[in-house]
Amino acid sequence: MGINMRKLIASLRSQQGFTLAEMAVAIAILAVGVLSVLALYPVGLVTGKRAEDIFISAKQARQVFDDLNTLTGQSPPFNAGSSFSYQKKFHDNQYFYLYRVDDLTALAIPGNPYDFPTNLFSVRLAIYTSDKYAGGTATSPVTPTGKAIDTYTTFFAKD
């Protein structure tokens, strides 16, 4: 039994392991890799939120323009010779839109002989997140100071 124990102790002493310095270097390399991957995580979250905002704003813009297209030319917001502004919150009050309708009939561009057709209206729509909401009423909004998610412009010819 004494011989076997000596052989066991001798074999254990002859085995090579990792030194403390080698382990420290390996852990440092692993830490740099993990921190690099974790640094990208917030960027992905911000990009995902921005993509969601753009998708929701484009969907809402299409809905607003479709709703405006169904209105007749004699009702607000399409009053000849005037401008009309409107705002409304949507999507569980996380966003709001603000649009302005301008009558282009009397618009004259210097040096351009082209006359716009009668009852032509320009509609500019801006969509914001609710933290930019500045107040006011639906038909008398206060212009927000922050940057819009996106803005859209279209034209309507109303009878």
Image (cartoon, rainbow, N blue to C red):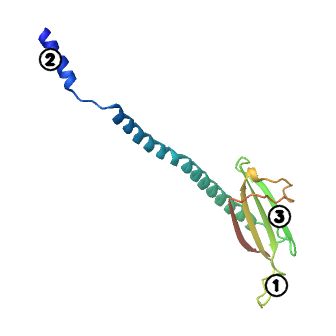
Separation of disc 2 and disc 1 at Cα? Answer: 105 Å
Question: Is 127 on the left or on the right of 104, as rendered?
Answer: left
Res 10 quadrant in image = top left
Between disc 3 and disc 2, whose residue precedes?
2
Compared with 112, 128 (above or below) is: above
The residue under label 1 is which amino acid type?
Answer: Ala
The residue under label 2 is which amino acid type?
Answer: Lys
Tell me how many marks there are. Answer: 3
The residue under label 3 is which amino acid type?
Answer: Ser
Residue at mark 3: 85
> Disc 3 vs disc 1: Cβ atoms closer than 8 Å?
no
Q: Nearer the viewer, residue 38 or 17?
A: 17
Q: Residue at x 48, y 43 (%)?
A: 35
Question: Is 146 on the left or on the right of 50, as rendered?
Answer: right
Residue at mark 1: 108
Between disc 3 and disc 1, whose residue precedes?
3
Question: Residue 79: x percent and y percent?
Answer: 86, 71
Can residue 72 be seen in this snapshot? no
Q: Residue at x 81, y 72 (%)?
A: 102
Question: Residue 124: x percent and y percent?
Answer: 75, 68
> Which mark is in front, 2 or 1?
2
Quadrant occupied by the N terminus: top left
Between disc 2 and disc 1, whose residue precedes?
2
SS for dot 3: strand
SS for dot 2: helix
Residue at mark 2: 7
Q: Nearer the viewer, residue 131 or 20?
A: 20
